[in-house]
Amino acid sequence: MRAPSLCHILARATAAVAALLLSLTVPPPAAHAHSGPDSLVVRTDRGWVRGAADRDGGRVFEGIPFAAPPTGELRWRPPRPVPRWSGVRNATAAAHPCAQLPLTLLPDGGPVLPGESNRTGSTTEDCLYLNVWTPARTGGRPLPVLVWLHGGGNVYGAGSDYNAARMAAHGMVVVTVNYRLGALGFLAHPALSAQSTDHASGDYGLMDQQAALHWVRRNIGAFGGDRNRVTLGGQSAGSADTCLHIASPTAKNLFHRAIQQSGACAADGGLTPLTLGAAERRGSDFAASVGCAEPTTAAGCLRAVPTTELIRASGTGASSLWAPNTGPRILPRPPHTAWAEGRVNAVPTLNGSTHDEYRYFTALYVDLLGGGPLTPDAYAALIRLQHGSRAAAVLDTYPASAYASANLAYSAVGTDQRFACPARADDRLYGSRAPVYSYEFADPDAPPFIPAPHTPQGAFHASELAYLFPTEGMAPLTPAQRRLSATMTAYWARFVATGDPNAPGTPHWPRHTADGDRVQVLAPDRVRPTTGFAADHHCGFWQPSLTSQGAAR
């Protein structure tokens, strides 16, 4: 027998090394044997994950990383790819929320919102994780996907605050997302801009949200989802951020429909991004407040500030300080400019608000934290402080004598100016390019989050969430409210699947048009369209350029 040549020896050695490397990167045989459309073990592009079965036979995968931990030198940088892992990673427990203070502001030390993150807060920067919920069976045709952005003023909240089992059970895959918050998510500073290839800074939270959408595009098929039927949605800040992604060139083709719940950005009264220059000036003031005033060393100094000090300086009510800004590549122009120029991701949109949005804020900041109800004189003084030269007209339109209390008059002003009329303006703008379905959640007896002895909360800000996502620690829904919940969930699921909320067995929901101006009222045993939304909320006063049309309810 001939002795093996050097070439043969090298070939065998190379094959052995390749086999060894393959054994280190390919999951164990058990993972292959059990993976499938309904398996608890799923392969992502970075490694395998093991989820858990929920009570209804669906699956939930919690704490899946979609970007590298934004810590150390990666603090205030765009999200980077997550390193690959070997073996099967447990995805059976939620990750930590992104860094934030707890919202335990009530007199008894309780949280002002029901989510777990609001009770605990967080000091963790390693937080870029998402959760995936699937229905009991995902075999067959891929399912539509809802990617959900939590609210909280871009300062607090977490994807894990939302139990998406009920939504998933209606035949969709639901993804809930964490993203950087407060200073860690939205700080702009000249020193950080100088280190960026775009010569800009800020909007890291928006970048995280788009990184999650890219993860969905690469991986959702392994969970039974259809990457070509992705709906991006959220409530409050999550809704406003969704609005921003509609105007973002870097979000093109990452989603195909949108859901906005109580958060606008394209019209007057909604979230208005700062310019890069304004954001950098605010960021410089913030840097000085944490001991990093020297421009030449600010970047390194800021990255050395402890997380606890950053979130303490960020505060809990400083969402206006941490607004997104234009200038970074993700948001090169304001949304209203992007719409005027036709540079938007126009998609079918389900958009709306609640009838009594601002009553929650009045109950919290006036009743619970401000010492009691407003008197008529105090109401007038507050309006003059907040509305300046227009105060007299506001008081003429919303006289305290027309309401059961000055608190309710003040709440009506905030509801109409900040939520209802901006939502309607977005409806009219969006409807010029794509189908829009507009709603108003109007349950006057929605279960409250907080006690409010002087302000009946009615259909307050975020009250509709309990009708879509099971919420612990709140009063159970009545039979009529459960029927409304079933109708709403069917509407939302149908919209995610088709771009049209009309589902078999539900009242007809007409498409919103500028001439018809129809809004679907969502109330217990009273689900129907109205043309009286603009008149009810004095939108002709707040936005006179948008002519009020239609009869009263």
Image (spheres, helix red, strand yellow):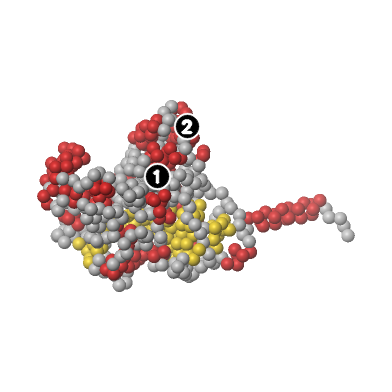
Identify the residue under disc 1.
Answer: 101
Q: Is residue 359 above or below residue 288?
A: below
Q: Picture quarter containing residue 394?
A: top left
Q: Is residue 133 above or below residue 407?
A: below
Q: Is residue 38 above or below residue 6?
A: below
Q: Residue furthest bottom?
A: 505
Residue 130 seen in render: yes
Between 4 and 441, the one lying in front of the other is 441
Callout 1 secondary element: loop
Separation of disc 1 and disc 2 at Cα?
A: 22 Å
Q: Where does residue 550 sit, x and y in percent of width and height?
A: 16, 59
Is 470 displayed left or right of 537 in the figure? right
Is 331 displayed left or right of 65 in the figure? left
Three-letter code for the amino acid on which mark 1 is drawn: Leu
Residue 241 seen in render: no
Identify the residue under disc 2.
Answer: 301
Between 412 and 400, the one lying in front of the other is 400
Q: Where does residue 512 sit, x and y in percent of width and height?
A: 25, 59
